[in-house]
Image: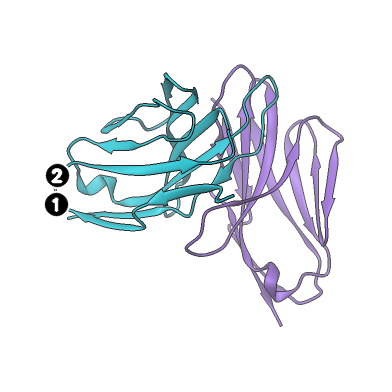
Amino acid sequence: EDQVTQSPEALRLQEGESSSLNCSYTVSGLRGLFWYRQDPGKGPEFLFTLYSAGEEKEKERLKATLTKKESFLHITAPKPEDSATYLCAVSPSGTYKYIFGTGTRLKVLA
Amino acid sequence: NAGVTQTPKFQVLKTGQSMTLQCAQDMNHEYMSWYRQDPGMGLRLIHYSVGAGITDQGEVPNGYNVSRSTTEDFPLRLLSAAPSQTSVYFCASSYSGQSSYEQYFGPGTRLTVT
């Protein structure tokens, strides 16, 4: 069964304290892996797409990496405005479906 | 360019009532989808469409109907609302093809069924 598990469920960081969020996935084949940011009361906002193991993408303080079993979202020197829920999703091969994890709630303290 | 729009933002229904959640996009995306988001459950796919006239079921389709008569619009119909359908509903759209593309989400509709 296709599955996505994110850890930790919640994370509190001091401003400037770097860390990583994990997304483990089980799919028969991978069309794509996606990271989104969701602020309270809003729809998810797209961050990155990764297609194959070894791929990396960066945007400001965020860097996403991909292996055959998991993806990491690295946050370098976070700021309070990075506080949000980060969602991971996979699209299995041969489907037009997307499977989301339950997210990591990140709180960055000033 | 408005992106993905959803109406209404909030809705309260009584058990057994029916209603339609509206979704529209102006990006000429072939792919559109509906999700529900519940605490601790993440986003779950209800129905999706890869183009006008083509729809398919997602993970949790029971109690919901969709149709896609135009590229722009993808309404979600609740046939007979139940308290278990209390949730936040998101519509999303993306390009479609052999590759898998990122989805753009609307602002959501918060539905309460009493």
Question: Can residue A106 be seen in the rendering of this structure?
Answer: no
Query: Is A18 situated above or below B85?
Result: below
Give the amino acid type for the residue marked by disc 2 in the picture: Gln
Chain that is coloured cyan in the picture? B
Q: Which mark is residue B14?
A: 1
* Left or right: where B108 falls relative to B50: left
Q: Which mark is residue B17?
A: 2
Chain A rendering hue:
purple
Q: Which mark is residue A60?
A: none
A77 or B22: nearer the viewer? B22
Farthest front residue in view: B1
A2 or B27: nearer the viewer? B27
A6 or B12: nearer the viewer? B12
Residue B39: x and y in percent read: 42, 55
* Left or right: where B51 falls relative to B100: left
* Left or right: where B113 falls relative to A13: left
